[in-house]
Image (cartoon, helix red, strand yellow):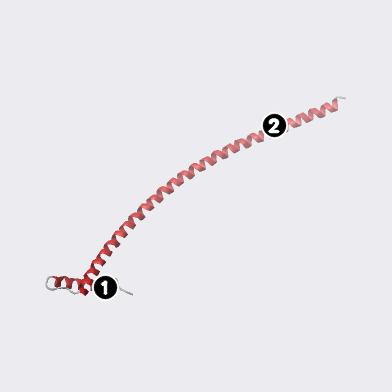
């Protein structure tokens, strides 16, 4: 595999030699290409650092937003739970009313039935 450190060391040595030579004599096309390559590697290195920094800050912001979203969701779920508890209480009240009504109507039915039977037995 290609070793970046080995390449960087080689490129640094070559470009330093070219810079020393730059003031004294003209440089060849190959040497110019090496200088351009060194400029590009420096540019890529700065872009890489900037990108990593930006990605780290974005990652931090996203985590903070996710925490806020979770807190908001928890609050909303708590509100929904409270509403369900209120609905449950209403159903319990309604159920107890229906139970009382059933007991009352059963008692009324027995009483009326007893009166009807007594009236039939005792009235000739």
Secondary structure of the residue carrying numbered label 1: helix
Among numbered discs 1 and 2, the one appearing first in the sequence: 1
Element type at marker 2?
helix
Which residue is at 72% across, 31% downward?
Answer: 107
Find residue 113 and report its horizontal and vertical position in percent. 78, 30
**Residue 72 x, y percent position in the rendering:** 43, 45
Quadrant (top left/top right/bottom left/bottom right) for the N terminus: bottom left
Q: Residue at x 62, y 36 (%)?
A: 94
Task: Classify mark 1: residues with Cα within 10 Å, few (<14), some (14-19) or many (20+).
Answer: few
Q: Is residue 52 above or below residue 118?
A: below
Identity of the residue furthest to the top in this view: 123
Q: Quadrant of the C terminus?
A: top right
Q: Residue at x 82, y 27 (%)?
A: 118
Residue 100 appears in which quarter of the rendering? top right
Q: Which residue is mark 2?
A: 104
Q: Which residue is mark 1?
A: 7
Q: Nearer the viewer, residue 41 or 68?
A: 41
Q: Position of residue 38 (x, y in %)?
A: 23, 68
Of discs 1 and 2, which sits in the foreground? 1
Marks counted in the figure total 2
Determine the CA span between mark 1 and mark 2.
96 Å
At horizontal 49% and vertical 41% (from top left) the residue drawn is: 79
- Where residue 35 is drawn, which disc sits there? none
Q: Position of residue 55 (x, y in %)?
A: 34, 57
């Amino acid at each position: 595999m290609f070793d970046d450190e080995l390449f960087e060391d080689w490129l640094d040595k070559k470009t330093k030699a070219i810079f020393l030579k730059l003031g004294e004599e003209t440089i060849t096309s190959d040497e110019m290409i090496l200088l351009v390559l060194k400029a590009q590697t420096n540019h890529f290195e700065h872009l890489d650092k900037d990108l990593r920094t930006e990605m780290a800050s974005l990652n931090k912001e996203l985590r903070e937003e996710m925490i806020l979203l979770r807190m908001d969701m928890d609050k909303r779920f708590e509100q929904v739970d409270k509403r369900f508890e209120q609905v449950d209480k209403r159903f319990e009240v309604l159920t107890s009313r229906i139970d009382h009504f059933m007991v009352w109507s059963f008692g009324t039915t027995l009483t009326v039935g007893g009166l009807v039977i007594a009236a039939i037995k005792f009235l000739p």
